[in-house]
Amino acid sequence: MWNSESVKRQPSGVIMKSVVVVYSSKSDNTAKIAQAIATEVNCQALKISNEEKVSTVDLKSYELVFVGTGIYAGNPNADMEKYLRMADFGDTKQFAFFITWGGAGTTCQLVTEKLRSILEMKGQKVTTDIFSCYGGWRYALLRRGHPNIKDLEDARRWSREIVSHMQK
Ligand SMILES: Cc1cc2nc3c(=O)[nH]c(=O)nc-3n(C[C@H](O)[C@H](O)[C@H](O)COP(=O)(O)O)c2cc1C
């Protein structure tokens, strides 16, 4: 049944089967962005967490992988870092990072450089086009309410651009 709500929720029409979103998230900030991207580009969003067996998330069959993480004391989410270090990606594919953070200093740059070097050492390609937005947390006033509607919209637009760039 089509109605205005379901029409709004339809993906942009950009469909590329070999795209996937993987993310790690402690307080669901990065999860919200992951879901927005997955809906926009019509793909799965797979959570990487410590409880799950790393081997169950197999990226070999994908061409484009969106990777999302929050930042913890200047580091990526430990589950994501461990996963990227251990995973067998198969052939070379394209990775694109999305980050939620508190805006502390250069930690976003530190984290993306760390993840980039892990992937490049494994022969993977990483775009320099990175999405980041603030993510608030319960015990701090700073950044409360993020990611907000605009952040989600920005993430959707960014993901569309990444996918369409890949298709050229
Ligand atoms: C213990 C802790 C440490 C954090 N360290 C940083 C940091 O170093 N730099 C930063 O910008 N944000 C930092 N943040 C903010 C988180 O990166 C931000 O809230 C993020 O959206 C969390 O994502 P997640 O809920 O998807 O895990 C920290 C938050 C917590 C709770």
Image: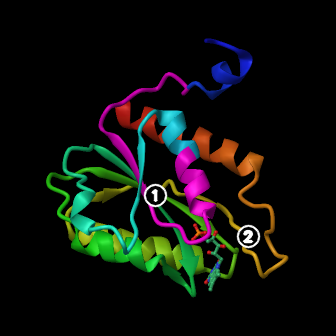
Disc on res. 47:
none
> In front: 167, or 87?
87
> In front: 167, or 32?
32
Question: Horizontal placement of 148 versus 65: left or right?
Answer: right
Residue situated furthest top in the rendering: 1
Q: What x and y, as percent, mark residue 129?
A: 50, 53
Q: Which residues are magenta?
A: 11-35
Q: Which residue is mark 1?
A: 128
Is 24 magenta? The answer is yes
Where is residue 123, by image quadrant?
bottom left
Question: Horizontal placement of 102 versus 58: left or right?
Answer: right
Q: Is mark 1 within 8 Å of ligand 1?
A: no
Instruction: Point out the image quarter for the C terminus.
Output: top left
Kindly state the secondary structure of the residue where label 2 is placed: loop
Q: Residue at x 76, y 53 (%)?
A: 148
Question: Horizontal placement of 147 versus 10: left or right?
Answer: right
What amino acid type should be assigned to the residue bearing mark 1?
Thr
Residue situated furthest bottom in the rendering: 73
Is 80 magenta? The answer is no
Q: Earlier in the sequence, mark 1 or mark 2?
A: 1
Q: Is mark 2 within 8 Å of ligand 1?
A: yes
Badge 2: few (under 14), some or many (20 or more) residues near its Cα, within 10 Å?
A: many
Q: What x and y, as percent, mark residue 48?
A: 39, 64
Residue 160 visible at all: no
Q: Which residue is mark 2?
A: 136
Residue 109 visible at all: yes
Position of 37 relative to 115 (above/below): above
Q: How far apart in space, not on screen, are marks 1 and 2 (Cα)?
A: 25 Å
> In front: 114, or 14?
14
In what quadrant does ligand 1 lie? bottom right
Q: What x and y, as percent, mark residue 70?
A: 56, 70
Q: What x and y, as percent, mark residue 133?
A: 66, 60
